Amino acid sequence: MASNPKVLALVLAGGEGKRLMPLTEDRAKPAVPFGGTFRLIDFVLSNLVNADLRHICVLTQYKSHSLDRHISLTWRMSTLLGNYVTPVPAQQRLGPRWFQGSADAIYQSMNLILDDQPDYVVVFGADNIYRMDVEQMLDAHIDSGRGCTVAGIRVPRSTASAFGIIDADTDHKIKSFLEKPADPPGLPDDPDSSFASMGNYVFTTQALVDALETDAADANSRHDMGGNIVPAFVDAGDAMVYDFTANTVPGATEKDKNYWRDVGTIDAYHEAHMDLVSVDPVFNLYNDDWPIWTNQAQKPGAKFVLDGRARDSIVSAGCIISGGYVEDSVLSPSVRIDHGADIDESVLLNGVTVGAQAVIRRAILDKNVVVAPGAKLGIDHEADIARGCTVSAGGITVVPKGLAIEPT
Protein backbone atom coordinates (compact mmCIF):
# COMPACT_ATOMS: atom_id res chain seq x y z
CA MET A 1 0.00 0.00 0.00
CA ALA A 2 1.10 3.57 -0.57
CA SER A 3 2.56 5.05 2.61
CA ASN A 4 -0.29 5.71 5.02
CA PRO A 5 -3.04 6.77 2.62
CA LYS A 6 -5.97 8.44 4.32
CA VAL A 7 -9.16 6.44 3.81
CA LEU A 8 -12.79 7.22 4.63
CA ALA A 9 -15.29 4.36 4.62
CA LEU A 10 -18.95 5.06 3.82
CA VAL A 11 -21.39 2.27 4.63
CA LEU A 12 -24.72 2.50 2.80
CA ALA A 13 -27.32 1.42 5.36
CA GLY A 14 -30.43 3.31 4.29
CA GLY A 15 -32.40 0.63 2.44
CA GLU A 16 -35.93 -0.29 3.46
CA GLY A 17 -35.47 -4.05 3.06
CA LYS A 18 -39.02 -4.65 1.83
CA ARG A 19 -38.25 -8.23 0.76
CA LEU A 20 -37.34 -9.09 4.37
CA MET A 21 -40.73 -8.10 5.77
CA PRO A 22 -41.93 -8.64 8.45
CA LEU A 23 -38.38 -8.67 9.94
CA THR A 24 -37.97 -5.11 8.67
CA GLU A 25 -41.40 -3.90 9.75
CA ASP A 26 -39.92 -2.17 12.78
CA ARG A 27 -36.19 -1.94 11.98
CA ALA A 28 -33.78 -1.07 9.17
CA LYS A 29 -32.48 -4.00 7.16
CA PRO A 30 -28.87 -3.67 8.44
CA ALA A 31 -30.24 -3.87 12.00
CA VAL A 32 -31.87 -7.29 11.44
CA PRO A 33 -30.37 -9.84 13.87
CA PHE A 34 -28.28 -12.64 12.41
CA GLY A 35 -26.39 -15.66 13.67
CA GLY A 36 -27.68 -15.53 17.23
CA THR A 37 -25.89 -12.48 18.61
CA PHE A 38 -25.03 -10.29 15.61
CA ARG A 39 -26.79 -7.80 13.36
CA LEU A 40 -26.27 -7.69 9.62
CA ILE A 41 -24.24 -4.50 9.79
CA ASP A 42 -21.69 -6.09 12.13
CA PHE A 43 -20.22 -8.04 9.21
CA VAL A 44 -19.22 -5.08 7.03
CA LEU A 45 -18.06 -3.06 10.05
CA SER A 46 -15.94 -5.97 11.24
CA ASN A 47 -14.36 -6.33 7.80
CA LEU A 48 -13.46 -2.65 7.78
CA VAL A 49 -12.02 -2.39 11.30
CA ASN A 50 -10.16 -5.70 11.01
CA ALA A 51 -8.49 -4.20 7.91
CA ASP A 52 -7.50 -1.10 9.94
CA LEU A 53 -9.96 1.18 8.14
CA ARG A 54 -11.36 3.04 11.12
CA HIS A 55 -12.86 6.27 9.86
CA ILE A 56 -16.36 4.97 9.16
CA CYS A 57 -19.63 6.79 8.51
CA VAL A 58 -22.84 4.75 8.29
CA LEU A 59 -25.45 6.50 6.12
CA THR A 60 -28.93 5.69 7.47
CA GLN A 61 -32.46 6.66 6.50
CA TYR A 62 -35.45 4.36 7.14
CA LYS A 63 -36.49 3.11 10.60
CA SER A 64 -32.98 3.74 11.85
CA HIS A 65 -33.48 3.96 15.63
CA SER A 66 -32.39 0.42 16.52
CA LEU A 67 -29.53 0.63 14.00
CA ASP A 68 -28.33 3.97 15.38
CA ARG A 69 -28.59 2.64 18.92
CA HIS A 70 -26.66 -0.52 18.06
CA ILE A 71 -23.84 1.45 16.40
CA SER A 72 -23.67 4.00 19.24
CA LEU A 73 -23.55 1.39 22.00
CA THR A 74 -21.45 -1.27 20.25
CA TRP A 75 -19.05 0.38 17.83
CA ARG A 76 -17.10 2.64 20.16
CA MET A 77 -13.65 3.23 18.68
CA SER A 78 -10.61 4.83 20.29
CA THR A 79 -11.10 8.60 20.16
CA LEU A 80 -7.51 8.98 21.39
CA LEU A 81 -6.35 7.60 18.03
CA GLY A 82 -8.96 9.52 16.05
CA ASN A 83 -10.95 6.42 15.09
CA TYR A 84 -14.72 6.44 14.80
CA VAL A 85 -17.81 4.64 13.59
CA THR A 86 -20.71 7.08 13.43
CA PRO A 87 -24.27 6.84 12.12
CA VAL A 88 -25.19 9.70 9.79
CA PRO A 89 -28.94 10.15 9.17
CA ALA A 90 -30.38 11.81 6.10
CA GLN A 91 -29.81 15.49 6.91
CA GLN A 92 -31.61 17.13 3.94
CA ARG A 93 -28.63 19.46 3.45
CA LEU A 94 -29.66 20.14 -0.15
CA GLY A 95 -33.34 20.72 0.48
CA PRO A 96 -36.39 18.98 1.98
CA ARG A 97 -35.93 15.56 0.34
CA TRP A 98 -34.81 12.10 1.33
CA PHE A 99 -31.99 10.26 -0.40
CA GLN A 100 -33.01 9.64 -4.02
CA GLY A 101 -30.58 6.72 -4.46
CA SER A 102 -27.27 5.41 -3.15
CA ALA A 103 -25.25 7.97 -5.13
CA ASP A 104 -27.50 10.77 -3.93
CA ALA A 105 -26.99 9.59 -0.35
CA ILE A 106 -23.25 10.19 -0.72
CA TYR A 107 -23.75 13.45 -2.64
CA GLN A 108 -26.05 14.79 0.07
CA SER A 109 -23.38 13.76 2.61
CA MET A 110 -20.49 15.37 0.73
CA ASN A 111 -19.53 17.29 3.88
CA LEU A 112 -18.20 14.01 5.32
CA ILE A 113 -15.68 13.75 2.50
CA LEU A 114 -14.79 17.44 2.53
CA ASP A 115 -14.27 17.43 6.30
CA ASP A 116 -12.17 14.25 6.40
CA GLN A 117 -10.19 14.97 3.18
CA PRO A 118 -9.31 11.33 2.45
CA ASP A 119 -7.12 10.13 -0.41
CA TYR A 120 -9.54 7.27 -1.07
CA VAL A 121 -13.19 6.56 -0.29
CA VAL A 122 -14.41 3.03 0.36
CA VAL A 123 -18.15 2.58 -0.28
CA PHE A 124 -19.63 -0.69 0.99
CA GLY A 125 -23.14 -2.05 1.49
CA ALA A 126 -24.44 -3.14 4.88
CA ASP A 127 -26.57 -6.17 4.10
CA ASN A 128 -24.32 -9.12 3.19
CA ILE A 129 -22.70 -11.99 5.08
CA TYR A 130 -19.01 -12.47 4.28
CA ARG A 131 -15.43 -11.92 5.42
CA MET A 132 -13.12 -9.72 3.37
CA ASP A 133 -9.79 -8.01 3.99
CA VAL A 134 -10.72 -4.63 2.53
CA GLU A 135 -7.11 -3.46 2.72
CA GLN A 136 -6.18 -5.96 -0.01
CA MET A 137 -8.85 -4.49 -2.30
CA LEU A 138 -7.58 -0.99 -1.48
CA ASP A 139 -4.03 -2.06 -2.38
CA ALA A 140 -5.23 -3.36 -5.74
CA HIS A 141 -7.06 -0.09 -6.40
CA ILE A 142 -4.02 2.02 -5.60
CA ASP A 143 -1.76 -0.17 -7.73
CA SER A 144 -4.13 0.10 -10.70
CA GLY A 145 -4.08 3.90 -10.80
CA ARG A 146 -7.75 3.93 -11.82
CA GLY A 147 -10.52 5.99 -10.32
CA CYS A 148 -12.93 3.16 -9.42
CA THR A 149 -12.61 -0.45 -8.31
CA VAL A 150 -15.61 -2.79 -8.04
CA ALA A 151 -15.52 -6.01 -6.01
CA GLY A 152 -16.66 -8.95 -8.13
CA ILE A 153 -17.56 -12.46 -7.04
CA ARG A 154 -17.44 -15.39 -9.43
CA VAL A 155 -20.86 -16.97 -10.01
CA PRO A 156 -21.91 -19.73 -12.44
CA ARG A 157 -22.72 -18.18 -15.81
CA SER A 158 -25.92 -20.24 -15.88
CA THR A 159 -27.29 -18.26 -12.90
CA ALA A 160 -25.56 -14.92 -13.54
CA SER A 161 -28.65 -13.30 -15.10
CA ALA A 162 -29.91 -12.61 -11.58
CA PHE A 163 -27.05 -10.21 -10.84
CA GLY A 164 -25.38 -7.03 -11.99
CA ILE A 165 -22.58 -8.45 -14.14
CA ILE A 166 -19.09 -7.11 -14.80
CA ASP A 167 -17.49 -7.76 -18.20
CA ALA A 168 -13.73 -7.31 -17.81
CA ASP A 169 -10.50 -7.77 -19.79
CA THR A 170 -7.69 -10.07 -18.73
CA ASP A 171 -6.07 -7.08 -16.97
CA HIS A 172 -9.29 -6.59 -14.93
CA LYS A 173 -10.24 -3.35 -16.71
CA ILE A 174 -14.04 -3.25 -16.88
CA LYS A 175 -15.41 -3.16 -20.43
CA SER A 176 -19.09 -2.97 -19.51
CA PHE A 177 -21.40 -3.12 -16.50
CA LEU A 178 -24.57 -5.09 -17.27
CA GLU A 179 -27.74 -5.20 -15.18
CA LYS A 180 -29.15 -8.77 -15.13
CA PRO A 181 -28.16 -9.61 -18.74
CA ALA A 182 -29.94 -12.43 -20.56
CA ASP A 183 -26.61 -13.69 -21.95
CA PRO A 184 -23.97 -12.99 -19.28
CA PRO A 185 -20.35 -12.80 -20.50
CA GLY A 186 -17.94 -15.46 -19.28
CA LEU A 187 -14.56 -14.77 -17.70
CA PRO A 188 -11.34 -14.83 -19.76
CA ASP A 189 -9.96 -17.59 -17.52
CA ASP A 190 -13.28 -19.37 -16.90
CA PRO A 191 -15.93 -19.18 -19.65
CA ASP A 192 -18.50 -20.93 -17.44
CA SER A 193 -18.38 -18.21 -14.75
CA SER A 194 -19.17 -14.50 -14.62
CA PHE A 195 -18.26 -11.65 -12.31
CA ALA A 196 -21.23 -10.46 -10.25
CA SER A 197 -20.94 -7.10 -8.55
CA MET A 198 -20.84 -7.32 -4.73
CA GLY A 199 -21.92 -3.69 -4.39
CA ASN A 200 -18.58 -2.81 -2.76
CA TYR A 201 -16.42 -0.06 -4.26
CA VAL A 202 -13.14 1.83 -3.77
CA PHE A 203 -12.73 5.29 -5.31
CA THR A 204 -9.96 7.80 -5.62
CA THR A 205 -11.53 10.75 -3.82
CA GLN A 206 -11.44 13.50 -6.45
CA ALA A 207 -12.66 11.12 -9.15
CA LEU A 208 -15.64 10.19 -6.96
CA VAL A 209 -16.47 13.80 -6.13
CA ASP A 210 -16.41 14.75 -9.80
CA ALA A 211 -18.63 11.80 -10.74
CA LEU A 212 -21.16 12.59 -8.00
CA GLU A 213 -21.40 16.23 -9.03
CA THR A 214 -21.92 15.29 -12.68
CA ASP A 215 -24.56 12.73 -11.71
CA ALA A 216 -26.40 15.18 -9.45
CA ALA A 217 -26.79 17.57 -12.37
CA ASP A 218 -28.35 14.87 -14.58
CA ALA A 219 -32.14 15.05 -14.23
CA ASN A 220 -32.51 11.67 -15.97
CA SER A 221 -30.23 9.78 -13.58
CA ARG A 222 -31.49 7.32 -10.96
CA HIS A 223 -28.58 8.51 -8.80
CA ASP A 224 -27.52 4.93 -8.10
CA MET A 225 -23.95 3.81 -7.46
CA GLY A 226 -24.22 0.60 -9.48
CA GLY A 227 -26.61 1.95 -12.08
CA ASN A 228 -25.07 5.37 -12.78
CA ILE A 229 -21.75 6.13 -11.06
CA VAL A 230 -19.90 2.92 -11.90
CA PRO A 231 -21.07 2.91 -15.56
CA ALA A 232 -19.74 6.47 -15.86
CA PHE A 233 -16.30 5.29 -14.74
CA VAL A 234 -16.57 2.31 -17.12
CA ASP A 235 -17.41 4.57 -20.06
CA ALA A 236 -14.34 6.66 -19.23
CA GLY A 237 -12.12 3.57 -19.15
CA ASP A 238 -11.38 4.28 -15.49
CA ALA A 239 -12.84 1.22 -13.68
CA MET A 240 -11.41 -2.17 -12.73
CA VAL A 241 -12.80 -5.28 -11.09
CA TYR A 242 -11.31 -6.76 -7.95
CA ASP A 243 -11.58 -10.55 -7.93
CA PHE A 244 -12.99 -11.54 -4.54
CA THR A 245 -11.42 -15.01 -4.87
CA ALA A 246 -8.00 -13.31 -4.65
CA ASN A 247 -8.85 -12.05 -1.16
CA THR A 248 -7.25 -14.01 1.68
CA VAL A 249 -8.60 -13.71 5.20
CA PRO A 250 -6.63 -15.13 8.16
CA GLY A 251 -8.17 -18.24 9.65
CA ALA A 252 -10.45 -18.99 6.68
CA THR A 253 -11.21 -22.65 6.01
CA GLU A 254 -11.28 -24.22 2.57
CA LYS A 255 -15.04 -24.51 2.90
CA ASP A 256 -15.82 -20.91 3.86
CA LYS A 257 -13.06 -19.14 1.89
CA ASN A 258 -14.67 -16.44 -0.28
CA TYR A 259 -18.15 -17.11 1.15
CA TRP A 260 -20.58 -14.31 0.31
CA ARG A 261 -24.31 -14.32 0.78
CA ASP A 262 -26.87 -11.67 -0.07
CA VAL A 263 -29.61 -12.05 2.56
CA GLY A 264 -32.08 -9.73 0.88
CA THR A 265 -34.99 -12.18 1.00
CA ILE A 266 -36.54 -14.33 3.72
CA ASP A 267 -35.45 -17.52 1.97
CA ALA A 268 -31.85 -16.29 1.57
CA TYR A 269 -31.82 -15.16 5.22
CA HIS A 270 -32.99 -18.60 6.34
CA GLU A 271 -30.52 -20.43 4.05
CA ALA A 272 -27.64 -18.31 5.37
CA HIS A 273 -28.51 -19.40 8.91
CA MET A 274 -28.50 -23.03 7.81
CA ASP A 275 -24.97 -22.41 6.48
CA LEU A 276 -23.83 -21.77 10.06
CA VAL A 277 -24.89 -24.88 11.93
CA SER A 278 -23.22 -27.96 10.43
CA VAL A 279 -20.18 -29.66 11.99
CA ASP A 280 -18.03 -28.19 9.20
CA PRO A 281 -20.00 -24.99 8.52
CA VAL A 282 -20.24 -23.35 5.12
CA PHE A 283 -19.60 -20.08 6.95
CA ASN A 284 -17.59 -20.28 10.17
CA LEU A 285 -18.57 -17.76 12.85
CA TYR A 286 -15.79 -19.07 15.11
CA ASN A 287 -12.78 -17.69 13.20
CA ASP A 288 -10.89 -15.83 15.94
CA ASP A 289 -8.25 -14.61 13.49
CA TRP A 290 -10.86 -12.44 11.72
CA PRO A 291 -13.64 -12.02 14.29
CA ILE A 292 -17.08 -10.64 13.65
CA TRP A 293 -17.47 -8.06 16.38
CA THR A 294 -20.61 -7.17 18.32
CA ASN A 295 -21.62 -6.37 21.86
CA GLN A 296 -24.13 -8.23 23.97
CA ALA A 297 -25.12 -7.63 27.56
CA GLN A 298 -23.51 -10.15 29.87
CA LYS A 299 -25.73 -13.22 30.20
CA PRO A 300 -25.24 -16.60 31.82
CA GLY A 301 -24.23 -19.51 29.63
CA ALA A 302 -26.82 -21.56 27.79
CA LYS A 303 -28.43 -24.19 30.03
CA PHE A 304 -29.73 -27.66 29.10
CA VAL A 305 -31.89 -29.38 31.73
CA LEU A 306 -34.32 -32.28 31.96
CA ASP A 307 -32.66 -33.97 28.97
CA GLY A 308 -32.95 -30.86 26.82
CA ARG A 309 -30.82 -31.27 23.70
CA ALA A 310 -29.52 -29.40 20.67
CA ARG A 311 -27.94 -30.96 17.59
CA ASP A 312 -26.09 -29.11 14.80
CA SER A 313 -27.28 -25.78 16.18
CA ILE A 314 -26.09 -22.45 17.59
CA VAL A 315 -27.47 -21.76 21.07
CA SER A 316 -26.64 -18.30 22.42
CA ALA A 317 -26.00 -17.22 26.00
CA GLY A 318 -29.01 -16.92 28.26
CA CYS A 319 -30.98 -19.71 26.55
CA ILE A 320 -32.65 -22.48 28.56
CA ILE A 321 -33.61 -25.72 26.83
CA SER A 322 -35.71 -27.52 29.42
CA GLY A 323 -36.51 -30.95 28.05
CA GLY A 324 -37.00 -29.73 24.46
CA TYR A 325 -35.13 -30.73 21.31
CA VAL A 326 -33.48 -28.37 18.82
CA GLU A 327 -31.89 -29.41 15.52
CA ASP A 328 -30.31 -27.43 12.64
CA SER A 329 -31.37 -24.14 14.23
CA VAL A 330 -30.02 -20.84 15.54
CA LEU A 331 -31.20 -19.51 18.90
CA SER A 332 -30.51 -15.89 19.86
CA PRO A 333 -30.01 -14.92 23.53
CA SER A 334 -32.64 -15.61 26.19
CA VAL A 335 -34.75 -18.12 24.24
CA ARG A 336 -36.75 -20.56 26.38
CA ILE A 337 -37.70 -24.04 25.14
CA ASP A 338 -40.03 -26.09 27.33
CA HIS A 339 -40.30 -29.89 27.68
CA GLY A 340 -41.34 -31.89 24.65
CA ALA A 341 -40.99 -28.97 22.23
CA ASP A 342 -39.43 -29.94 18.90
CA ILE A 343 -37.67 -27.31 16.75
CA ASP A 344 -36.00 -27.96 13.39
CA GLU A 345 -34.37 -25.73 10.72
CA SER A 346 -35.52 -22.57 12.44
CA VAL A 347 -34.21 -19.19 13.60
CA LEU A 348 -35.45 -17.88 16.97
CA LEU A 349 -34.54 -14.28 17.81
CA ASN A 350 -34.11 -12.76 21.28
CA GLY A 351 -36.59 -13.59 24.00
CA VAL A 352 -38.68 -16.17 22.14
CA THR A 353 -40.59 -18.61 24.38
CA VAL A 354 -41.69 -22.01 23.09
CA GLY A 355 -44.18 -23.92 25.20
CA ALA A 356 -44.37 -27.62 26.01
CA GLN A 357 -45.01 -30.03 23.13
CA ALA A 358 -44.93 -27.21 20.54
CA VAL A 359 -43.55 -28.07 17.10
CA ILE A 360 -41.68 -25.60 14.87
CA ARG A 361 -40.45 -26.41 11.36
CA ARG A 362 -38.53 -24.13 8.95
CA ALA A 363 -39.59 -20.91 10.64
CA ILE A 364 -38.17 -17.56 11.68
CA LEU A 365 -39.55 -16.15 14.95
CA ASP A 366 -38.87 -12.48 15.61
CA LYS A 367 -38.18 -11.05 19.08
CA ASN A 368 -40.42 -11.92 22.04
CA VAL A 369 -42.73 -14.28 20.13
CA VAL A 370 -44.58 -16.66 22.45
CA VAL A 371 -45.55 -20.08 21.12
CA ALA A 372 -48.19 -21.63 23.36
CA PRO A 373 -47.96 -25.24 24.51
CA GLY A 374 -49.01 -27.67 21.81
CA ALA A 375 -48.96 -25.07 19.00
CA LYS A 376 -47.50 -25.96 15.60
CA LEU A 377 -45.67 -23.65 13.19
CA GLY A 378 -44.39 -24.27 9.69
CA ILE A 379 -46.54 -27.35 9.14
CA ASP A 380 -49.86 -25.87 7.93
CA HIS A 381 -49.03 -22.69 6.00
CA GLU A 382 -52.66 -21.63 5.65
CA ALA A 383 -53.05 -21.80 9.42
CA ASP A 384 -49.83 -19.80 9.85
CA ILE A 385 -51.08 -17.03 7.56
CA ALA A 386 -54.42 -16.94 9.38
CA ARG A 387 -52.51 -16.26 12.63
CA GLY A 388 -50.79 -13.20 11.12
CA CYS A 389 -47.59 -14.89 9.95
CA THR A 390 -45.89 -14.49 6.57
CA VAL A 391 -44.90 -17.47 4.41
CA SER A 392 -42.08 -16.94 1.91
CA ALA A 393 -41.91 -18.29 -1.63
CA GLY A 394 -39.60 -21.01 -0.32
CA GLY A 395 -42.03 -22.07 2.40
CA ILE A 396 -40.43 -20.34 5.40
CA THR A 397 -42.93 -19.20 8.04
CA VAL A 398 -42.03 -15.81 9.57
CA VAL A 399 -43.65 -14.72 12.84
CA PRO A 400 -43.69 -10.95 13.49
CA LYS A 401 -42.23 -9.45 16.64
CA GLY A 402 -44.19 -10.13 19.85
CA LEU A 403 -46.95 -12.27 18.27
CA ALA A 404 -48.59 -14.95 20.41
CA ILE A 405 -49.10 -18.26 18.60
CA GLU A 406 -51.94 -20.40 19.93
CA PRO A 407 -52.81 -23.97 18.92
CA THR A 408 -55.22 -24.27 16.00
Image (cartoon, helix red, strand yellow):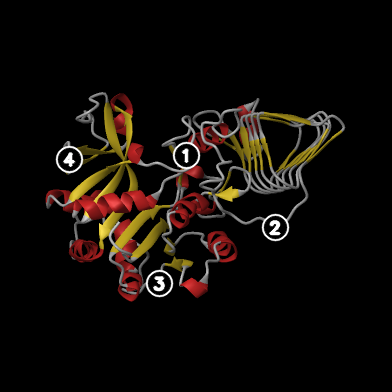
The secondary structure type at the circle numbered 3 is loop
**What residue did someone put label 2 on?**
297
Question: Which of marks 3 and 1 precedes in the sequence?
Answer: 3
The answer to whether 238 is drawn above or below residue 130 in the figure is below
Q: Marks 1 and 3, Cα distance to the nearest angstrom?
A: 29 Å
In contact (CB < 8 Å): disc 3 and disc 2:
no
Check disc 4 and give the amino acid type.
Answer: Asp
Residue 154 seen in the current view = yes
**What residue did someone put label 4 on?**
171
In the rendered image, residue 312, in percent from the top left (x then y), is placed at 66, 29
Residue 274 is drawn in which quadrant?
A: top right
* Mark number displayed over residue 67: none
Question: Which of marks 2 and 4 precedes in the sequence?
Answer: 4
- State which mark lies toward you, 4 or 3: 4
Q: Which residue is at 30% across, 52% downward?
A: 139
- State which mark lies toward you, 4 or 2: 4
Label count reads 4
Q: Marks 3 and 2, Cα distance to the nearest angstrom?
A: 31 Å
Q: Which residue is at 16% across, 37% downward?
A: 169
**What residue did someone put label 3 on?**
91
Q: Is residue 298 left or right of residue 290?
A: right
Residue 202 is drawn in which quadrant?
A: bottom left
* Outermost residue to the right: 306
Near-viewer residue (333 or 213): 333
The secondary structure type at the circle numbered 2 is loop
Question: Which of marks 1 and 2 precedes in the sequence?
Answer: 1
- Could you tell me which quadrant the C terminus lies in? top right
Q: Marks 2 and 1, Cα distance to the nearest angstrom?
A: 29 Å
**What residue did someone put label 1 on?**
265
